Image: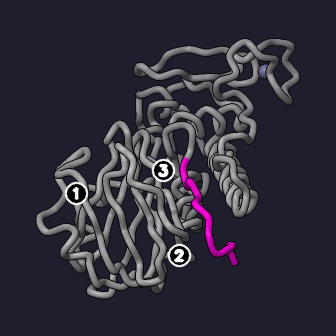
Amino acid sequence: MPPPYFSCLIATQSVPELPEVETVVRGLRPHLEGATLAQVVVRRPDLRQPFPKDFARRLTGRRVVSLSRRAKYILAQLDDDVQLLAHLGMSGRMVLHTGPPPPPGKHDHVVFMTDRGTQVVFSDPRRFGLMTLIAPGEAPSHPLLRDIGPEPLGNAFDGPLLAERLRGKKTPLKAALLDQRVVAGLGNIYVCEALFQAGLSPRRQARTVGPVRAVRLATAIREVLHAAIAAGGSSLRDYVGSSGELGYFQHNFSVYDREGQPCPGCDCDGTVRRIVQSGRSTFFCPQRQR
Ligand SMILES: [Zn+2]
């Protein structure tokens, strides 16, 4: 059990991807599941898009049945079968206060107060996040959810499935893996890391990833995500009761943001290279990754 009073920044230093969102869900779950939303305050009309009409009123008094993740979305199942869907965007964070909360900050846009006295504050300086409500039964056909590809940590995700998703794609492999319709939840960091681990070039055409390479890649994707979630979980544990900021991104990446540094755990004697693909930095080892 956490101490009676603590505030916890459940967030990250960079754009949240699957492991960060999963960490947020796991951090919030003990505080929200089973709790009733006693009061909901919305401090502005919109984030990336407008809040639904009567957003706060429709949530107030509802009990949170369960909290889950789909791709980079947080989903709260409510007791009237409506789902609250939240996306952290580029800079969104959930701040948890189990004691008396400080005065609201400039970027604190939504406050959820539970019947347990806990507050969850959604803070988002750049406002690329979003929150909306999904009517009962509408999740499978909802525009934000219906086209999302398989969960990489789901039981169905393996080499053959990944090979099928990449088949015929003439885009660079890096771009294909960032496409949420191909596989859910990956962003720039974990695509770079998974490609390095799998030894596959980010510039290779996606359609050239055959069955053998796809097994390697699917395994690498799962491994880097599991490792990041484990690091996030231990950061959450370390944080409780301490005074510092959640050091979630302190764990080391192999290639991400390491341009010019020695290539780690690789037989090559070179350094990590950076190139720009679709306007975003890719970090890789040209010798290891073919
Ligand atoms: Zn190397």
Inspect the image, locate mark 1, and give the three-letter code of the amino acid beneath it.
Pro
**In which quadrant will I find the N terminus?**
bottom right
Q: Residue at x 72, y 17 (%)?
A: 272
- Determine which residue is flagged by label 1: 143
Residue 5 lies in magenta, yes or no? yes
Q: Does the Cβ of the disc 1 residue fall within 8 Å of ligand 1?
A: no
Q: Where's the C terminus, which quadrant?
A: top right
Query: Which one is in front, 10 or 224?
Result: 10
Instruction: Give me the residue at 24% from left, 70% from top.
Output: 134
Extent of the magenta region: 1-11
Q: Which scheme is used to colour this image of the protein? A: one colour
Mark 1: few, some, or many residues within 10 Å (few <14, many ≥20)? few
Is residue 215 visible to the viewer in this orientation of the structure?
no
Residue ID at (57%, 77%):
30
SS type, badge 3:
loop
Residue indicated by mark 2: 31
Residue 207 location (% of width, % of height): 48, 34
Look at 54% across and 50% down and name the residue there. 11
Q: Is residue 193 above or below residue 97?
A: above
According to the picture, the residue beneath numbered tag 3 turns out to be: 185
